[in-house]
Amino acid sequence: MEYNFDDFKVQGTKFNYYFVCKRKLWLFSKGIAMEEANDRVQQGKITHEYAYKNKEDKKEKLIDGLIKIDILEKEDIREVKLSSKMKDSDRMQLLYYLYYLKQLGIIKRGTLNYVKERRVEEVVLTIQDEEKIEEVLKEIKNILKFKYPPKVEKLTYCKKCAYYEYCYVKEID
Ligand code: SF4
C-alpha cells in the first residue's frame, strides 16, 4: 500500500488502541463509545487535573482535531499517566505524537510522566520508530475496513475495559 501521511493519519486514541486491542480499536472507531464509564478514562481526567494543578494554562493542545498533547513545551511534549500499566501503548502513542509533529515540521522530544510512581521516561523518535508507525497506520486503515469487529481476545486487562460487558455478553450469545 502506497504511503501518504495525510491519507493515513488517525486520532491518537485509535493509534493507542491498536496496541491495546484491535477489537477495541474497531469498536471505538465505529462510534461504539463506552469510555466515559471506564475507570481508566476517569483516572486519565484526574491525572490531567493533577498535571495542571500548578499551571495557568490548563488546556490540552489539540492538533488537527486528532492528537491531544497533555503539555506542550519549547523542546518537549509531555504525556501524564497515572501508572505505567499500559506503558507499551502509552510509549507508542507518544512516539506517534512526535512523528505527527515531525510531519508538520516540528521536532520535539517526549516524556512520559507516571504520577503514581513519580517516574519520568524520556522518549525519542528514531527512524526505526517512524517506519514502524507507518506500518501501523497502514494496518489500522486495513482493520477499520473490516465489516465486523476482530474477535475477542482474552487479555489480562479485559475486565477493566469499557467494552468488557459488550465483548463477553456477545461471546455467550
Ligand atoms: S474487553 Fe478485551 S477484547 Fe473486548 S475490546 Fe476490551 S480489551 Fe478488547
Image: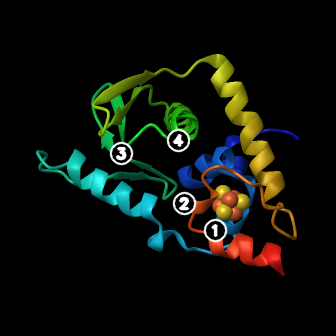
Tell me which colouring the rendered structure shows: rainbow
Q: Which residue is mark 4?
A: 86
* Mark nearer the viewer, 3 or 1: 1
Q: Is residue 125 visible?
A: yes
Tag 3: residue type? Leu
Q: Which residue is mark 3?
A: 82
* Mark nearer the viewer, 4 or 2: 2
Q: Which residue is mark 2?
A: 160
* Mark nearer the viewer, 2 or 3: 2
Label 4 to label 2, Cα distance in Å? 12 Å
Q: Does the beta carbon at disc 1 come under 8 Å from ligand 1?
A: yes
For the residue pair 91 and 135, the one nearer the viewer reads as 91
Tag 1: residue type? Tyr
Q: Does the beta carbon at disc 3 come under 8 Å from ligand 1?
A: no
Residue at the extreme bottom of the image, as rendered? 173
| Position of residue 48 measured from the top left corner of the image (x, y, whole percent) | 29, 52
* Mark nearer the viewer, 4 or 1: 1
Residue 97 lies left or right of residue 30; in this view the side is left
Residue at the spot x=79%, y=38% of the render?
Answer: 3
Mark 3 Cα within 10 Å, few/some/many (few <14, many 20+)? many
